[in-house]
Image (spheres, rainbow, N blue to C red):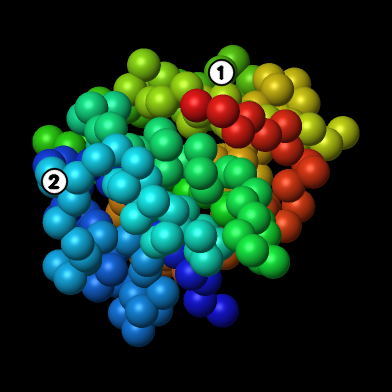
Amino acid sequence: MARKTFISYKYSDATDLRDTILKKLGSDAKYYQGETADSPDLTNTSVENIKKNLRDMMFDTSVTIVVISPSMKQSKWIDWEIEYSLKEITREDKTSRTNGILGVIMKYNNSYDWLISSSTSPDGCSARYTDESKLYPIITKNRYNLNTDNKYSCPTCKSFNRLTGSYISLIDEETFLANPDSYIENAYNKSRDINNYDISKQK
């Protein structure tokens, strides 16, 4: 089932990847609620007006895709969009639920090593390390935050499953584009089991 999806991205970094995601979603792209060629030009408008327009686009969505790109933290809006996605917002008689959130790591210079490195521990488990300095705190605070009794995929090395161990999972763009619906659905399902996660809603 298609989910109403908002894509949060740094325009100067990730427009091409945003367009590729929309193309890959095909007919499901009609659910995309983010910026389009027909969106109003907000260049010279106030911060509050920009936020209002973003709230209008995001209110009725259930999944937020965040494009993780090298200059993402230079954006004025991405961390705010994530914060808004995590909150329950009431309008008139309708309250939005917390969105599922998925990070899609952009390939840069033909590699993901600007953000990700990996190693193998003595017990044979492979571990993936993320350069958290490239991420907003609101992302890192919602990583590895599964709180169930069986939260570790490997109790010995205390590692987490890449998809279920974090409320905001990070998936490289090639893996995501090979089967976007499965990752969107994973994010959505976690939002329905949100009590299994220690959520931080403040940026």
Measuring from the top left, give residue 179's x and y in whole percent: 42, 66
Measuring from the top left, give residue 34's x and y in whole percent: 32, 61
What residue is shown with label 2?
43
In the displayed orientation, state which residue is furthest to the right.
Answer: 149
- Is residue 51 left or right of 153 when viewed as pictured? left
* Mark 1: amino acid: Ser
Q: Earlier in the sequence, mark 2 or mark 1?
A: 2
Quarter location, residue 70? top left
Residue 132 to residue 195: above or below = above
- At a point 59% along the width and 15% down the height, the residue shown is 122
**Residue 118 in view:** no
- At a point 41% along the width and 20% down the height, the residue shown is 132
**Residue 24 in view:** yes
Measuring from the top left, give residue 20's x and y in whole percent: 22, 63
* Mark 2: amino acid: Thr
Measuring from the top left, give residue 87's x and y in whole percent: 61, 44
Q: Which mark is residue 121?
A: 1
Quadrant position of the N terminus in the picture: bottom right
Towards the viewer: 48 or 126: 48
- At a point 77% along the width and 26% down the height, the residue shown is 155
Residue 203 to residue 53: above or below = above
The residues bearing labels 2 and 1 have C-alpha atoms spaced at a distance of: 49 Å
- Is residue 76 left or right of 160 when viewed as pictured? left
